[in-house]
Every structure is written in C-alpha cells, then in structure tokens.
Amino acid sequence: MARFSLVEVITAAQSGQVISFPTDTLPALAVQPEQAARIYQLKQRPPEKPLILMAAHLDQLLSYAQGTAVECVQWQAIANQYWPGALTLVLPASDRLPAAVNPLDRSSIGLRIPDCAIARQILAETGPLATTSANRSGQPALLDPDAIAAEFPEVAVLAEDPWPAPSGLASTVVRWQPDGQWQVLRQGSIQLGEG
C-alpha cells in the first residue's frame, strides 16, 4: 500500500491524479475539477450524485458560482460565519464549472472550505479540487488512510501519521433558493442559525 508525502500528493494532484487526504468530516478523494470523471470511475459513482469543490480560501471558489451582487454578499456572509467548517453551500454555478463535476446538472455546485489545516495546506497549493468521501459508491466511508490506500491503489494517499481525527459525520448541505432562503439537503453537524 503506497502512501505519499505532502509534496508528492500536491504534485500528483497538480498533474491530474486522484489524491486522498483528511478533512474535518470524512477523508476525501480529490482531483482537479477538469478530471472529475476519474473519481466517478474509481468510486463507480452514479452521475446523478455531484461532487463538491473544496478550496483553502473563499476567493478560490467565488468564480464557480454566479449570482446577483446582493446574493453574493449573502453567500459571503454565511461562508464567513461557518467556514472553515462542515457546511457545504450549493449555489448557482457559473460557466466556469467543468461538466464532469456535476454531469447531469450544470446549474449548481457545492462549495466548502474544510476545517482541517493539512487539507487547506494541500488545497492552497492545488487550487480548488473536486471532492467526495473515500469509499466505493454505496459503501461506508473509509476513515483509515491504510484502508483507503488498499481500496484505491491508484490514488495518492497522504502519508502523514496520524491523520487528524475526522468527525465521521458528513457536512451539512444547504441549497440557495431563489427566494433568498436556504434549503437543507442533508443535515450534518452544523445547523443554520447556530453560532
């Protein structure tokens, strides 16, 4: 089972390979957005389940969303309140979004900044990555890096030991509605309205 140094993982991601690293919620499989089809193939993931974009900084993600000036202010306000953290914002997508990230619906994109220093360190170097949990589709999420390396030998799995402990709970996912409200698509550890 191969495990890779931080520099090797970053280099692998920059060259379009799938990598794996810890986050605050569940360990991630991640790849450059243009190469997102590789994750669908690896996970045997159905195309109706979109990936999300993770980044280290809000300004890395804003160009993937498209809204009015007022909407953008509201999005930045909630991002500033909950990021880095376990909240995924599903926003209207800009034309910058590669089709492979959300194959059946180019109109929206999930965005998140994880509350995990090593994840943000990687993302700061790679730019935004298309991400999902590290598991075969329909199977429980893998939490151990050795298990991830065994299940996905073609993935560059970060070697750092020990990995920061994930919460094991997926992020809360909320979708922006045209009426200016948030619709909860998946309840995780964050409940909107909590400080």
Image (tube, helix red, strand yellow):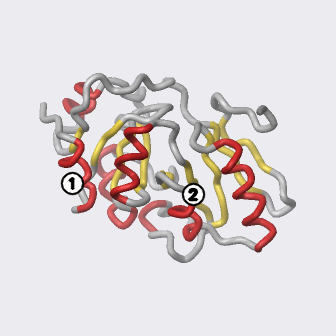
Look at the image and tell me in which quarter the C terminus lies: top right
Q: Quadrant of residue 191?
A: top right
Residue at screen point 26% across, 25% down: 161
Query: Picture coordinates of residue 50 (x, y %)?
Result: 51, 53
Nearer to the camera, 168 or 100: 168
Nearer to the camera, 88 or 10: 10
Residue at screen point 71% across, 44% down: 81
Q: Going by the picture, which residue comes out furthest to the bottom? A: 95
Of labels 1 and 2, earlier in sequence is 1
Within-10-Å neighbours for mark 1: few <14, some 14–19, many 20+: some
Residue at screen point 40% across, 60% down: 127
Question: Which label is found at residue 68?
Answer: none
Query: Picture coordinates of residue 33 (x, y %)?
Result: 40, 62
Question: Which label is found at residue 58?
Answer: 2
Question: Which label is found at residue 12?
Answer: 1
Within-10-Å neighbours for mark 2: few <14, some 14–19, many 20+: some
Query: Picture coordinates of residue 108 (x, y %)?
Result: 61, 63
Q: Going by the picture, which residue comes out furthest to the right? A: 179
Query: Picture coordinates of residue 150 (x, y %)?
Result: 19, 30
Horizontal placement of 110 versus 19: left or right? right
Regarding mark 1 in the picture, which secondary structure is present there?
helix
